[in-house]
Amino acid sequence: MKQQLTLVFFISFFVSATIAAQQKADTVTTKEIYGLRVGVDLIKPFISFLEEDTKGLELVGDIRILNNYYAAVELGFEDKVSKEDYMNYTTKGSYIKAGVNYNAYKNWVGMTNEIYIGMRYGFSIFNQTLNSYTPNVKGTYFIPTEVLPNTEFKDLSAHWGELVFGMKAETLKNLYLGFSFSFKKMINTKEPENFKNLYVPGFNRVYLNNTGFGINYTLSYLIPIVKKEK
Amino acid sequence: MRKYLILLFILCFTFINCEKDDICIETTTPKLIVVFYNNDIPATKKAVTSLTVSADTLGNLYENKSLDSIAIPLDLTKNSTFYKFKSGTITDSINFTYDRKDVFVSRSCGYKTIFENFKIESRTANWIKNDTLKNTTIDNETAAHLSIFH
């Protein structure tokens, strides 16, 4: 039994070797583009246009490092006013996200579309300004008045991890439209005193158990650098 | 492998849908809890048979009630609140003074006000015989803050 297995093991080498040899003879060599892809997020300018007290911009970029792996980076800034039931605050700051995408989509020869899963590390530096609040009182016997502290909490920061799911499609030559959805989990934050980081640039709204999510809609252009034979 | 990754991803999103922080469920600005005791037997509570409570210029908070404990709000726009306690036809008034401090609670609740250096600035003694302040900081409603003996 043991002998037989060893035999099968060695035979399999020859079989695979001959298959490989045949494939080499059959394949037509195709060139795959490896390059730098740069783009912009379309949702942020759209929201800036709709809401006058919200400004934001995000630049995206990725570079193909291995056959199915892309190193990706996102850079952005946000200036956003958030209105809650009992308060109003402004978050202003910038962020960077870096990580890797794995393309799980098997393309036809010559096509470079993507359905990918990725991971990111995010870091943001920002300020929070508490514009106004009304002390929360149950009952209406004494009616509280709105307080306008205008307190600015400076030099706050946050680190987080992201799981990204997205797709990219080449719509015109070297021009890609992309959509992605991300799930975020906060690792560490520098919190303001007597306030909380309820919104973090790049992370978006911070939910109770320090999670968050985001949607990106990107338009990007591929700058071809090298063409590798497949 | 790919299928598992996608499954993992879907699972993550089901979790974030479960949590809610839009509704304020935490405790907010505390009220002053007053408990009435028997002046002759200080350990036993004694209800005021016909109690009417009102702040300086506002309407009645309690009207002709028989109660041994009450919860009254404090004014958040100034550092003192003037209350009138009427037992039957006899009125006593108490002027409370304090420092206000706003403490962050949560996204949905915003800020609550807590009261520090809480004290009775002045009090008349018509039906109220004595008083004991349990704490100078009022930041919750879990225990009584003020005992009134009558």
Image: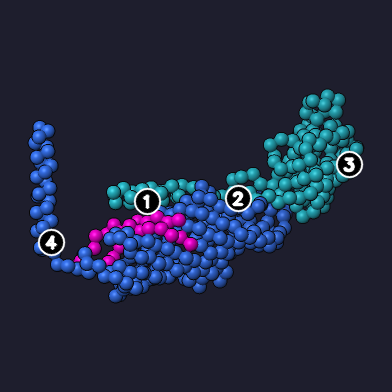
Chain colours: A blue, B cyan
Which mark identifies residue A24?
A: 4
Q: Residue drawn 34% across and 73% down?
A: A223
Q: Residue furthest bottom?
A: A173
Q: Which residue corresponds to the image point at 22% horizontal and 69% vertical from the top-left? A: A31
Tell me the residue at 56%/71% (across/down). A52
Amino acid type at circle 4 is Lys
Q: Determine whether label 4 and label 1 are within 8 Å by CB.
A: no
- Badge 4 sits on which subunit? A
Looking at the image, tell me whether mark 2 or mark 3 is earlier in sequence order. 2
- The dominant secondary structure in magenta is strand
Q: The disc labelled 1 sits on which kind of residue?
A: Phe
| Residue pointed to by mark 1 | B9
Residue A21 horizontal side relative to residue B107, left or right: left
Can residue A123 be seen from the camera position used here? yes
Callout 3: residue from which chain? B
Query: Is B143 situated above or below B113?
Result: above
Query: In front: A205, or B59?
Result: A205
Q: Mark 2 — residue?
A: B106
Using the numbered discs, state the Cα–Cα distance from disc 1 to disc 3 in whole angstroms. Answer: 65 Å
N-term-proximal mark, 2 vs 1: 1
The residue under label 2 is which amino acid type? Ser
Q: Name the mark nearer the viewer: 2 or 1.
A: 1
- Element at badge 2? strand
Q: Is residue A116 magenta?
A: yes
- Circles 4 and 3 on the same chain: no
Q: Quadrant of residue B52?
A: top right
Say which amino acid is labelled 3: Arg
Q: Nearer the viewer, residue A157 or A55?
A: A157
Disc sitting over residue B123 in the figure: 3
Mark 3 element type: strand
Residue A2: x %, y % from top left: 12, 33
Stretch of the chain drawn in magenta: A96-121
